[in-house]
């Protein structure tokens, strides 16, 4: 996603994978090979801390994506999004597994960041600074109800 989006807009990537951070920084972006053999390059900023990304990007982002595995990493991504996304920003989770939206919603509770979840059947392998897109698939993104609209309590007076 970063390699494709980096061709048309500013992209910032958070990664705990040091080899990835170093290679992408040295290249100034990510090389992408698509399933049809095409080669692309998407410019992006990358950092391994929130402060680093905020400094490089010059401020908070409008949209963020979550692609991590595991509940602990999902909660960490939600807490990090509080700092990296603008108020009213959108966090899109394209993760495998059930319950990720609840984990992100809890981590973002009280913030002004909105959460949307989805699923994608695109496949890829990742090496430092390079992504090989293995197959095209469909991506579905659905919106979650806001906490205020999902409340089932009501009151009446006589």
Image: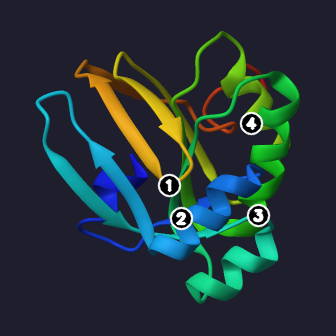
Label 3 near label 4: C-beta < 8 Å? no
Q: Mark 1 points at which residue?
A: 129
Nearer to the camera, 110 or 132: 132
Residue 155 visible? no
Observer-nearest of 114 and 70: 70
Dot 2 falls on a residue whose secondary structure is helix
Please state which of the two labelled residues, at mark 4 or mark 3, is closer to the viewer.
Answer: 3
Which quarter shows the C terminus? Answer: top right
User: In the rendering, at what x and y percent does residue 10 appear?
Assistant: 39, 74
Closer to viewer: mark 1 or mark 3:
1
- Pointer 1 or 3: first along the chain: 3
Residue plotted at (61% across, 76% down): 60
Q: Name the residue under label 2.
A: 24
Q: Earlier in the sequence, mark 1 or mark 2?
A: 2
Q: Distance between the residues labelled 3 and 2?
A: 12 Å
Q: Residue 115 carries which label?
A: none
Mark 2 or 4: in front is 2
31 left or right of 36 in image: right
Callout 4: few (<14), some (14-19), or many (20+) C-alpha neighbours within 10 Å?
A: many
Q: Position of residue 1 (x, y in %)?
A: 39, 45
Label 1, label 2: how far apart the Cα atoms are? 5 Å
- What's the distance in space between the residues labelled 2 and 4, CA to CA? 30 Å
Contact, CB < 8 Å: mark 1 with mark 4? no
Q: Position of residue 132 (x, y in %)?
A: 36, 35
* Of the image marks 2 and 4, the number of the one nearer the N terminus: 2
């Amino acid at each position: 996603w970063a390699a494709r989006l980096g061709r048309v807009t500013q992209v910032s990537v958070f990664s705990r994978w040091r080899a990835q951070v170093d290679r992408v920084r040295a290249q100034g972006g990510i090389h992408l090979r698509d399933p049809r053999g095409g080669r692309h390059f998407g410019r992006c900023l990358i950092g391994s801390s929130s402060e680093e990304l905020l400094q490089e990007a010059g401020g908070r982002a409008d949209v963020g994506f979550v692609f991590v595995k595991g509940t602990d990493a999902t909660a960490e991504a939600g807490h990090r999004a509080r700092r990296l996304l603008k108020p009213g920003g959108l966090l899109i989770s394209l993760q495998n597994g059930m319950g990720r939206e609840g984990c992100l919603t809890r981590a973002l509770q009280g913030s002004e960041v909105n959460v949307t979840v989805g699923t994608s059947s695109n496949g890829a392998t990742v090496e430092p600074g390079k992504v090989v897109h293995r197959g095209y698939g469909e991506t579905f993104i659905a919106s979650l109800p806001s906490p205020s609209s999902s409340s089932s309590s009501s009151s009446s007076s006589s």
